[in-house]
Amino acid sequence: MHELVPSGVSELSGFPRVALGHYPTPLEFAPRLSGLYSPCRIHIKRDDCTGLAFGGNKVRQLEYYLGHALSTGCDAVLSTGAVQSNYMRTLAAAASKLGLECHIQLEDRVSGKSDLYHRSGNRMLTELFGAHITYCPDGEDEEGADRMVREIAGKLEADGRKPYVVPLKPTRRPLGALGYIEAARELQDQWTDQELGPDLIVVGSGSGITHAGLLFGLRLLGCDVPVMGACVRRNAELQGPRILSHCDRLSEMIGAPGLVRADDVWVSDHSFAPGYGQPTERIRNTIGTAAHLEGLLVDPVYSGKALACLTGQLEEGLLPGYQSVIFVHTGGTPALFAYQDDMFAGTEPRR
């Protein structure tokens, strides 16, 4: 069994954590991408390189959820997410690494997808890691999905197991956000060493755990650099209160009230439409541009939409005055394989 390890942030010392990732992840300048948006200089925080099972932001989050699970003596973990969920793939891999039984409930949040979508990418990897997979028929019912996965947990308890449900609902304690409070310090140390002085940080905002943790962590450090969350799951009107709610809970957990105010929360749904997991021509072009200019892979659901949110606003002059931007790459690479039909819509892949 893996041993619990201390956090590098004193305020988090009371929260159990298990080591899963490779840190620090690189902070890299993207010269050719920046050339398109001069005078803005874009640096990329490579959290696609966190190491476990294709990496991504979920690794940092799960260090705290599974640290808590291990500290309570659990022997099984459960969660619920979309068919192509990065979270479910990473949870299944972490459970395998830690010797925990894993139960994954998949929600069909994106209608009309091909068989390739339902068997490739994250879906394939989740099964490869040995997770027990069930399905939730309604992909937009958070309450219903949560209830169903807890019913599975109840059956495990009846069999004498000790299950732990990794929550994604905003009403639960956002333990995963603690991983991005740590990441905020790591990132600040890197930009200080590189003498960057960023004036904007951009990150994808779905469950809101990464966005809220990063924002809260920077404010805990006394840093007032704005953080823009690029909406990937719901529109800005719904996402903003979710982020503030996470931050309020973090304040209660750590005992640091008033760090994040409503006017600190910046969310943009510039490139969100037509909805979750539905790439547009803009998204496809952004993915192609990142690949062609920087050899950088971003995905159609999260990191590609977030990057399109940044570059689209730069193109349209909606971010005047921002000349040093850090884009947090949250991973999601396996989804590229599941979205081949969308990526090459109307064209034949090169041979």
Image: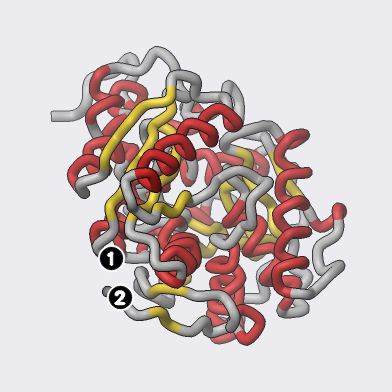
Vertical arrangement, residue 136 with respect to residue 88, above or below: above
User: Given the current orientation, which residue lies at the most extreme left position?
Assistant: 351
Please say whether residue 285 is visible from this viewpoint: no
**Nearest to the observer: residue 130 or residue 319:** 130
Please say whether residue 79 is visible from this viewpoint: yes
| Left or right: where 138 falls relative to 170 | left
| Cα distance in 3D space between marks 2 and 1 | 6 Å
Residue ID at (75%, 71%) = 219
Check if mark 2's residue and mark 1's residue have beta carbons within 8 Å. Answer: yes
**Three-letter amino acid code at disc 1?**
Leu
Q: Position of residue 120 (x, y in %)?
A: 23, 32
Q: Position of residue 256 (x, y in %)?
A: 79, 74
Circle 2 packing at 10 Å, graded few (<14), some (14-19), many (20+), is: few
Residue ID at (28%, 65%) = 98
| Left or right: where 72 falls relative to 199 | left
**Three-letter amino acid code at disc 2?**
His
| Left or right: where 10 falls relative to 55 | right
Q: Which quarter of the figure has residue 345?
A: top left
Residue ID at (37%, 35%) = 84
Residue that numbered label 2 is attached to: 2
| Badge number at residue 81 | none
**Nearest to the observer: residue 225 or residue 117:** 117
Image quadrant containing the N terminus: bottom left
Image quadrant containing the C terminus: top left
Callout 1: SS:
helix
Callout 2: SS:
loop
Vertical arrangement, residue 217 with respect to residue 307, above or below: below
Circle 1 packing at 10 Å, graded few (<14), some (14-19), many (20+), is: some
Q: Position of residue 190 (x, y in %)?
A: 53, 80
Q: Earlier in the sequence, mark 2 or mark 1?
A: 2
| Badge number at residue 98 | 1
Vertical arrangement, residue 138 with respect to residue 57, above or below: above
